Amino acid sequence: MSGDTLPTATRISDPGLRALYRQENRWQAWLDVEAALARAQAQLGIIPAAAADAIAAMSRLELLDRKRIDEGFARTGHTLVPLVWELSRVVGEPHGGWVHWGATTQNITQTGDLLVLRQAHAIFFRQIGEILSAMADLAERTADMPMAGRTHGQHAVPATFGYKVAVWIDELMRHADRLREARPRLFVAMLGGGAGTFASLGEHGPPVQEAIGRLLGFGSMRVPSRALGDHLAENICILGLLAATCGKIGREVYTLMKTEFGEVEEPVPPGTVGSSTMPQKRNPKLCQDIIAAAAEVRTQVPLALEAMTTEHEADRTTSLMMDAAEGRACIAMGDVLARLGEVMRGLEVDPARMRANLDLGGGLIMAEAVMLDLGQAIGRQHAHDVVYDAAQAAFVEGKSFGDLLAADKRVTAHMKPEAIRKLLDPTAYTGLCAQMARASASRGRAAAQELQR
């Protein structure tokens, strides 16, 4: 469940996900669950309180003999048993025999891995908050900055760059909501024993599981089946959605950075080398990282869904699949968010280039505005036909759209030349872009403050 996602030499530090998914951190999380199990059982009189105290005191990885643990793993090939053996040894007599009482491996590892995942979520919330804060500043700064709105890769109607950022804010906020709303379903303790039937603890099973949950700050599974994986897959699906949004934003900035667009540029610190052979290159490295790592997150979604297809009451193959999907998705997600935050904080925008690109069509981007104004006199469909003729002639024949309109009696019968010129001003047809940008900035900033608490 660990690895390097992005080998590229960017200047962005690891946000901490790799450390979380190192084996040692997972082991400590499992030991934390063993300690909670012992304390919960002692509270209910199942094991002696002195045993629970001894187990909790020794459930620290630094107190265990790593060499013994490694030798045990090499000999048994078992995920947890050598760790349980070593914990029992250091607890010693007469209490070591109460370690892992009534539990099965997946009860401990799955609950422990959720402790790790909760740490990962805390990082994600902090990162999303930082991104939303940066986006809020960017949206306000560019709320009135006109640019070409594009659909199907073509000029559509004018917009503002702040409106584009408002879209990003709106989508990211929903992903934060999804992660928050999934927490009660996701962070639940499991203690059903070998087949999830509570056979080893009987009537004590549910209250022990609930007590473990309380000690860990978790809920408790209603049916602690080892075949249940929908809550784990839900988390990875949400990360996939979040990654899709981040990848979309990365791709948009990447596209607008192209020489032919030149409307924005990601941060390019002095000394950054874009190419070993082309000195002029200012490549979108951060955006490329975002796009690549976001794709890696999304590729874990099918694996997580496949891991839900557990056979009978338990199947280690699907557990391995889910573990791998979670680790890879979380590490890559941290990389994505770290880089997206850097891009949003340092994004350079070029309003002059945006305006130049807005004017590339010689006013064609304002065809809808002309059509609607003319339509008030002759009807929408007739106006559409008139403006369509002028627009197509302007494009195909390379003529001035404004001149063609001014020469068409169907237009001039209802519209003076000055009115035509006024209608061809793209800065006057950005709708409610500025208002939406400022409103989204306000919401994004409030959400950022909440996420960063």
Image (tube, helix red, strand yellow):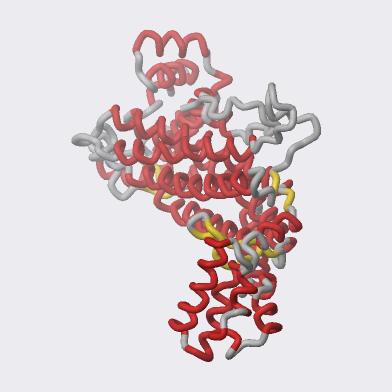
Q: Where is residue 328 in the image (x, y as percent from the top left)?
A: 47, 32
Q: 99 or 26, which lies in front?
A: 26
Residue 403, given in percent of the width and then of the height, sits at: 64, 74
In the displayed structure, 200 sits above or below 376; it is above
Q: Where is residue 260 in the image (x, y as percent from the top left)?
A: 64, 46
Residue 119 locus on image (x, y percent): 55, 40
Task: Identify the residue at image location x=51%, y=67%.
Answer: 392
Quadrant of the rendered image containing residue 352: bottom right
Up-down relation of residue 329 to residue 2 (above or below): below
Residue 204 visible in the snapshot: no
Does residue 106 lie above or below 430 as drawn?
above
- Residue drawn at x 68%, y 61% is 139
Could you say which is closer to the camera, residue 242 or residue 381?
381
In front here: 203 or 253?
253
Instruction: Give the residue at x 67% y 45%.
Output: 343
Q: Residue furthest right?
A: 270
Query: Which residue appears at 50% of the width and 9% of the height?
Result: 67
Left or right: where 365 falls relative to 294? right
Q: Is residue 206 visible?
A: yes
Q: In this view, does 164 lie to the left or right of 267?
A: left
Counting every numbered tag in the picture gives 0
Answer left or right for 202 relative to 263.
Answer: left
